[in-house]
């Protein structure tokens, strides 16, 4: 379907004209309930009804839209028992997101990580400046005249 993000399909990636795989992934994962569905499937197959119950507040139409999109992106598959399960690609995504989950847990606790605390005091790198990272005037050593 034309609105499903796929790497290399420029028109399918909202907010990007590059069609880069990362942009396609962020588009898909940024859709309402997509990450929650993947999270609920992390421990094994779940039927659509049970999945909807775990995702309180999700309409059945949104659930089936996300299931179709995640299936089309090869992150999940439907089992022969009409349940949904992560594919190997879906499990690989979970492993890739683990460091982000670790960071989020530390962030929620208000402590960050040692590398985050050290990095926040460090001078910005050339990559930070190229990527447009929000770098304060004080960090750059710019003083008011």
Image (cartoon, rainbow, N blue to C red):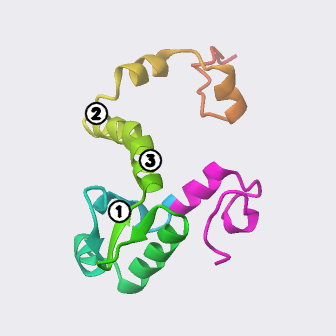
Q: Nearer the viewer, mark 2 or mark 3?
A: 3
Residue drawn where x is 27% and y is 70% of the image: 46
Which residue has dot 2 on it? 110
Which residue has dot 3 on it? 92
* Of pointers 1 and 3, the one earlier in the residue sequence: 1
Is residue 138 a member of the stretch shown in magenta? no
Q: Is 63 left, or right, of 29 in this rendering?
A: left
Out of 7 and 30, give the one closest to the viewer.
Answer: 7
Number of numbered tags placed on the structure image? 3
SS class, disc 2: loop
The residue segment tinted magenta is: 1-28
Out of 116 and 51, give the one closest to the viewer.
Answer: 51
Residue 60 horizontal/vertical position (percent): 36, 85
Proximity of marks 2 and 3: CB atoms separated by less than 8 Å: no
Q: Residue furthest front?
A: 80
Within-10-Å neighbours for mark 1: few <14, some 14–19, many 20+: some
Name which quarter of the figure residue 139 lies in.
top right
Residue drawn where x is 42% and y is 59% of the image: 87
Q: Is 40 left, or right, of 124 in this rendering?
A: left
* Of pointers 2 and 1, the one earlier in the residue sequence: 1
Q: Quadrant of the C terminus?
A: top right
93 relative to 143, above or below: below
Residue drawn where x is 58% and y is 15% of the image: 123
Residue 15 horizontal/vertical position (percent): 68, 60
Which residue has dot 1 on it? 36
Proximity of marks 1 and 3: CB atoms separated by less than 8 Å: no
SS class, disc 1: helix
Residue 142 horizontal/vertical position (percent): 66, 17
Can residue 55 be seen at all in this image of the molecule?
Answer: no
Q: Is 61 left, or right, of 58 in this rendering?
A: right
């Amino acid at each position: 379907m034309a609105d499903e993000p796929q790497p290399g399909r420029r028109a399918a990636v909202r907010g990007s004209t590059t069609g880069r795989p990362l942009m396609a992934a962020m588009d898909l994962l940024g859709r309402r309930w997509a990450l929650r569905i993947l999270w609920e499937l992390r421990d094994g197959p779940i039927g659509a009804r049970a999945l909807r119950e775990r995702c309180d507040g999700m309409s059945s139409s949104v659930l089936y839209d996300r299931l179709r999109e995640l299936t089309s992106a090869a992150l999940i598959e439907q089992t022969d028992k009409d349940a949904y399960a992560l594919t190997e690609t879906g499990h690989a995504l979970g492993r890739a997101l683990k460091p982000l989950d670790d960071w989020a847990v530390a962030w929620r606790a208000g402590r960050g990580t040692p590398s985050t605390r050290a990095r926040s005091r460090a001078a910005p790198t050339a990559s930070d400046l190229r990527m447009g990272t929000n770098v304060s005037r004080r960090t750059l050593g710019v003083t008011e005249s």
